[in-house]
Image (cartoon, rainbow, N blue to C red):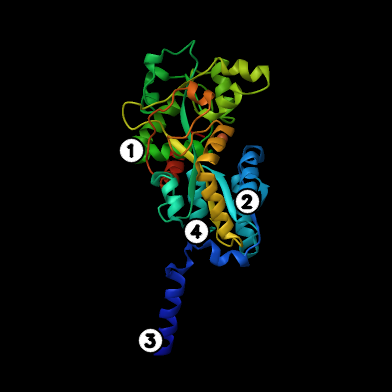
Amino acid sequence: MDKLFLNIFLLSSIIFTGSSDILQAESYTLHESTESKEVNIYSARKAYLLKPILKAFEKDTGIKVNIISGKSKELQKRIEREGTNTRADVLLTVDAGNLYIAKSKDLLKKIYSKKINTLIPEYLRDQDGYWYGLSVRSRVIMYNPKKVNLSDLSTYEDMANKKWKGRICVRSSGNIYNQSLLASLIYHLGEKKAKTWAKNIVHNFSRKPKGNDRTQMISVILGECDITLANTYYLGKWMSSEKDKDRKYAKQIAVYFPNQSDRGAHINISGAAVVKYSKNSDNAIKLITYLAGDKAQELYAEANHEYPIRENINVSNIVKSWGYPFKQDKLSAAQLGKNNRKAVEIFDKVNWQ
Ligand code: FE
């Protein structure tokens, strides 16, 4: 190799791979003058859930927050399309699988903040610093108390037992929630056993997969099936609803946390990441730090009946009513993204639909 070329090559390797591209939260003040006093969020989370917390953030920091809401996939596509021109500073979305995909598409910026790393337990964030969990949700068994004996419930694995034949309804495998649950089973049981599990669950279906989590819960209530898999906050929404119909529904279905005597119930996260071409990344880091703090955690988890990222934070009475604390599967959230492709393959092979 030509000597001059080699030098340029080495220099550019240092520039592109060196730690200089890692943003340090501790260096706010150095950059502050070049940034505006605002931060732009692309959010797959509903704006009403965020409003009270973001208002508090604006008041405490003087940084104005702008939100663009949309579906997770659409927002990712938009960030991809906008490239260096994007206005997005923070991507807020649900499911570690989605955050993992955004990272692998090179849409996110690596950050390093000692404070954030202290606030957010390691298993709830990306080890390389690309995304951070801000709330915890659990995907549990929900059952019809009139038709199911509590003693018949135990683990996700047990749902594959013949005793549940024609008694399980689920949503489609195209949904990332079920993909992440299967990804966790691939990790814990191995690919072969996870595939057998999925195959046997399909044998136990009471009907073809259709609808969202609430559709499954209504099917349980209407007697179309006896058990289902759903995220707990959907029941929380019914319990706190102003509609009589929702509150009536809520009384006819119950939560069961599986695998309490071994690894714990499957959990996932909602989380945030700084967008690769963010123009206000110091403000973005401030926002993520704020959302991980005690004050925001209480509000953030309560707004959607989710769980806080640390157990010392209060949960709502509704959330408490299902049993808290419960044993959570503390598998690294990144593993759910890593095993996502395998999970999708298994679902296709066993014709989950
Ligand atoms: Fe959801």
Task: Say which of marks 2 and 3 sits in front.
Answer: 2
Q: Position of residue 53 (x, y in %)?
A: 61, 41
**Mark 4: C-beta under 8 Å from nearest atom of ligand 1:** no
Would you say the residues marked 1 and 3 are in contact, meaning their CB atoms lie under 8 Å apart? no
Distance, label 2 to label 3, CA atoms, is: 46 Å
Task: Say which of marks 1 and 4 sits in front.
Answer: 4
Q: Between disc 1 and disc 3, whose residue precedes?
A: 3
Q: Quadrant of the N terminus?
A: bottom left
Q: Between disc 4 and disc 3, whose residue precedes?
A: 3
Q: Residues within 10 Å of mark 4 (few under 14, many from 20)?
A: many
The residue under label 2 is 41
Would you say the residues marked 2 and 3 are in contact, meaning their CB atoms lie under 8 Å apart? no
Amino acid under disc 4:
Ala
Distance, label 1 to label 4, CA atoms, is: 35 Å
Amino acid under disc 2:
Ile
Q: Secondary structure at mark 3?
A: loop
**Residue drawn at point x = 43 percent, y = 54 percent:** 114
Measured along the vertical axis of the image, is residue 220 above or below residue 340?
A: above
Mark on residue 25?
4
Task: Say which of marks 2 and 4 sits in front.
Answer: 4
The residue under label 3 is 1
The residue under label 1 is 188
Distance, label 2 to label 4, CA atoms, is: 18 Å
Amino acid under disc 1:
His
- Residue 209 vs residue 182: left or right? right
Q: Between disc 2 and disc 4, whose residue precedes?
A: 4
